[in-house]
Image (tube, rainbow, N blue to C red):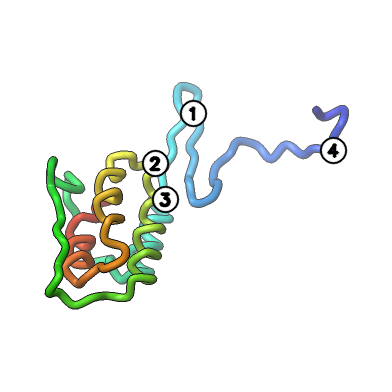
Amino acid sequence: MAKEFEMNDLGLLTYYLGIEVDQRKDCIMRKQSTYAKKLLQQFKMIECNPTKYPMEAKSQLEKDAEGNLVNSTKYRHVIGSLRYLTNTRPDLSYVFKIMSGYMEKATMMHIKRLNTLFAM
């Protein structure tokens, strides 16, 4: 390709679209800790309760018909931003699948649940 195109060798990939890459001889590791910390600060979740397991197996949320509705646009933004973490944390996929089901009528209960479910 160097014969056909002007190219520069920038070395090994270390950071791309919020994903940190650590390339070694025996493995390639990816993580998003900087992105996750930025999200925690942005959404004022820095004091959330970390947990080893993001959600109990077979755990379900229910509609909170009597709860106080929250801004659905903001809730969608939070869920969409957090879903990007599943690139390096597939264990969070189930959590965000469940939480995504409440984008239209999210209540304070769902926001509180997000605070307790989000684990680093």
Q: Earlier in the sequence, mark 1 or mark 3?
A: 1
Q: Is residue 15 left or right of residue 63?
A: right
Measure the alpha-carbon separation of dots 2 and 3: 9 Å
For the residues labelled 4 and 3, say whether their Cβ atoms are less than 8 Å apart.
no
Name which quarter of the figure residue 14 lies in. top right
Measure the alpha-carbon separation of dots 1 and 3: 24 Å
- When the figure is inspected, residue 55 is found, relative to residue 42, above or below; the finding is above
- Of the two numbered discs 2 and 1 in the rendering, the one whose residue sits closer to the viewer: 2
SS for tag 1?
loop
Measure the alpha-carbon separation of dots 2 and 1: 17 Å
Residue appearing at x 33%, y 39% in the figure: 90
In this figure, which residue is indicated by the disc labeled 1? 24
Q: Residue furthest right?
A: 4
Q: Position of residue 25 (x, y in %)?
A: 50, 23
In this figure, which residue is indicated by the disc labeled 2? 88
Residue appearing at x 35%, y 59% in the figure: 79
Position of the N terminus by quadrant = top right
- Of the two numbered discs 1 and 3 in the rendering, the one whose residue sits closer to the viewer: 3
For the residues labelled 2 and 3, say whether their Cβ atoms are less than 8 Å apart.
no
Name which quarter of the figure residue 2 lies in. top right
> Which three-letter amino acid code belongs to the residue tagged 2?
Thr
Mark 3 is surrounded, within 10 Å at the Cα level, by few (under 14), some (14 to 19) or many (20 or more) other residues, namely some
Q: Residue furthest front?
A: 65
Q: Which dot marks residue 84?
A: 3
- When the figure is inspected, residue 6 is found, relative to residue 107, above or below; the finding is above
Residue appearing at x 33%, y 67% in the figure: 75
In this figure, which residue is indicated by the disc labeled 4? 6
Q: Earlier in the sequence, mark 4 or mark 2?
A: 4
Q: Position of residue 21 (x, y in %)?
A: 49, 40
Mark 1 is surrounded, within 10 Å at the Cα level, by few (under 14), some (14 to 19) or many (20 or more) other residues, namely few
